[in-house]
Each structure stands twice: as C-alpha cells, then as structure tokens.
C-alpha cells in the first residue's frame, strides 16, 4: 500500500489503555489520508478495543480518509459480531 501509514495496536488494549490509544489513533485518522491499523499483536482486549477502532473509523470518515483494519484476532472479530459491528470495521484479509 503506497503512501499508507501503519499504526500497530498494542498487545493489550483494555479500558485502561483505551483513551490513550483512541487519542493517538484519532489524530492519525484525521491527518493521514490512508491508514492501516495492524491489530495482529493484539492479545489482551475487551470491548474497549472495538470502541477505539470505531473512533478511528469515525475520525477518518469525517475527513474522507481511508482506514483499514488488518490482523484482527478471531476473538475480537467474534466480539464485533456479538455487538453487530463487524460490517462497520473495514477489515483487510
């Protein structure tokens, strides 16, 4: 992906880290026309991780920027399905 900025999610993303990560991701989503979120290192998470992803998607959409999520763990995807938001996440195979 040419000219795409990659943001790697931390291994742990729970309520305790969510505000900081959401702030970082939101800033990138507002300023980078093409952003790839690498979630492949995500190991310990709760629903806050999904909220962070949705924050990034909202910020990117407001600027008409592209944001894609890659490497989302199966358990996080299952959680997204439970909440009915899997279709909102721009997932890359």
Image (cartoon, rainbow, N blue to C red):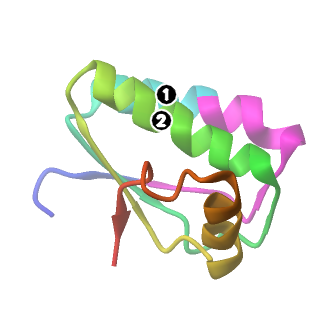
Q: Earlier in the sequence, mark 2 or mark 1?
A: 1
Marks 2/1: CA–CA distance: 5 Å
Q: Secondary structure at mark 2?
A: helix
On the picture, is 78 further left or further right than 92?
right
Q: Position of residue 39 (x, y in %)?
A: 55, 65
Between residue 32 and residue 47, name the one nearer to us.
Answer: 47
Q: Residue at x 86, y 41 (%)?
A: 15
Vertical arrangement, residue 3 with respect to residue 55, above or below: below
Give residue 56's mark.
2
Quadrant in the picture for residue 17: top right
Vertical arrangement, residue 74 with respect to residue 83, above or below: below
Quadrant in the picture for residue 16: top right
Q: Residue at x 38, y 64 (%)?
A: 91
Q: Residue at x 42, y 37 (%)?
A: 57
On the picture, is 93 further left or further right than 25?
left
Give residue 26's mark.
1
Q: Position of residue 56 (x, y in %)?
A: 47, 35
- Hey, which residue is sitting farthest left in the picture? 2
Q: Residue at x 71, y 76 (%)?
A: 75
Extent of the magenta region: 7-22
Give residue 92's mark.
none
The answer to whether residue 56 is magenta is: no
Instruction: Determine whether label 2 and label 1 are within 8 Å by CB.
Output: yes
- Hey, which residue is sitting farthest right in the picture? 16
Q: Position of residue 77 (x, y in %)?
A: 60, 69
Q: Residues within 10 Å of mark 1 (few under 14, many from 20)?
A: many
Q: Secondary structure at mark 1?
A: helix
């Amino acid at each position: 992906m040419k000219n795409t900025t990659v943001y790697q999610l931390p291994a742990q993303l729970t309520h305790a880290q969510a505000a900081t990560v959401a702030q970082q991701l939101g800033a990138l989503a507002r300023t980078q026309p093409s952003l790839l979120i690498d979630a492949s290192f995500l190991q310990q998470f709760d629903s806050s991780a999904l909220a962070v992803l949705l924050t990034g998607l909202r910020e990117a959409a407001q600027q008409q920027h592209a944001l894609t999520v890659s490497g989302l763990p199966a358990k996080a995807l299952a959680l997204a399905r439970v909440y009915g938001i899997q279709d909102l996440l721009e997932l890359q195979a």
